[in-house]
């Protein structure tokens, strides 16, 4: 159940971030040294390391949210909960920025 929640959060976030001009989302599911590895990447732009460092903070969101949604707690808990669940099961969720052909990609990786 926890693994489904973790991967579901990452997939939902990547698909919501996809746009008409940046529609590609890449997923990899593998195993290595008795660990499950899941990676998901999508093209992004203008993301800073400072912003990325906040991604796992409880309540932080890059989504356009209004005060109504903020009070209902609909945003800002997915990545926080995904990392918390992953660590509970001996894993972690990490994030990195990569550049390919002058395009910026964000990659989330889960190892459990």
Image (cartoon, rainbow, N blue to C red):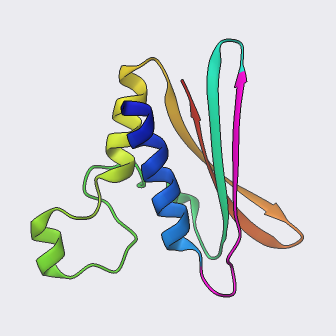
From the viewer's perspective, is 22 left or right of 64? right
Q: Is residue 54 above or below residue 29?
A: below
Name the residue at the bottom extreme.
Answer: 20
**Does the magenta-highlighted stretch encompass residue 15?**
no
- Quadrant of the image containing the N terminus: top left
Q: Tell me: residue 110, above or below residue 103.
A: above
Looking at the image, which residue sits at the far top?
Answer: 34
| x then y, percent, for residue 72 | 11, 67
Count of labels shown? 0
Residue 99 image-quadrant placement: bottom right
35, 63: nearer the viewer: 35
Question: For the magenta stretch, what is the residue range?
Answer: 19-31
Q: Position of residue 88 (x, y in %)?
A: 35, 22
The residue located at (39%, 49%) in the rendering is: 79
Please tell me which residue lies in front, 94 or 37: 37
Tell me which residue sits at (65%, 44%) in the image: 39
- Is residue 59 shown to the viewer in this render? yes
Where 79 falls versus 70 (above or below)? Answer: above
Position of residue 95 measured from the top left corner of the image (x, y, whole percent): 58, 47
Task: Note whether residue 53 is visible.
Answer: no
Tell me if 20 is positioned left or right of 17 in this view. Answer: right
Q: Quick check: 72 left or right of 36?
A: left
Q: Residue furthest right?
A: 101
């Amino acid at each position: 159940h926890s693994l489904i929640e973790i991967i579901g959060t990452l997939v939902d976030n990547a698909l919501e971030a996809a746009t008409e001009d940046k529609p590609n989302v890449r997923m990899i599911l593998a195993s290595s040294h008795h660990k499950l590895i899941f990676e998901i990447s999508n093209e992004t732009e203008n993301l800073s390391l400072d912003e990325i460092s906040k991604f796992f903070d409880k309540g932080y969101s890059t989504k356009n949210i209004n005060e109504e949604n903020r009070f209902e707690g609909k945003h800002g808990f997915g990545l926080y909960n995904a990392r918390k669940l992953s660590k509970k099961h001996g894993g972690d969720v990490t994030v990195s920025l990569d550049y390919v052909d002058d395009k910026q990609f964000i990659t989330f990786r889960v190892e459990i």
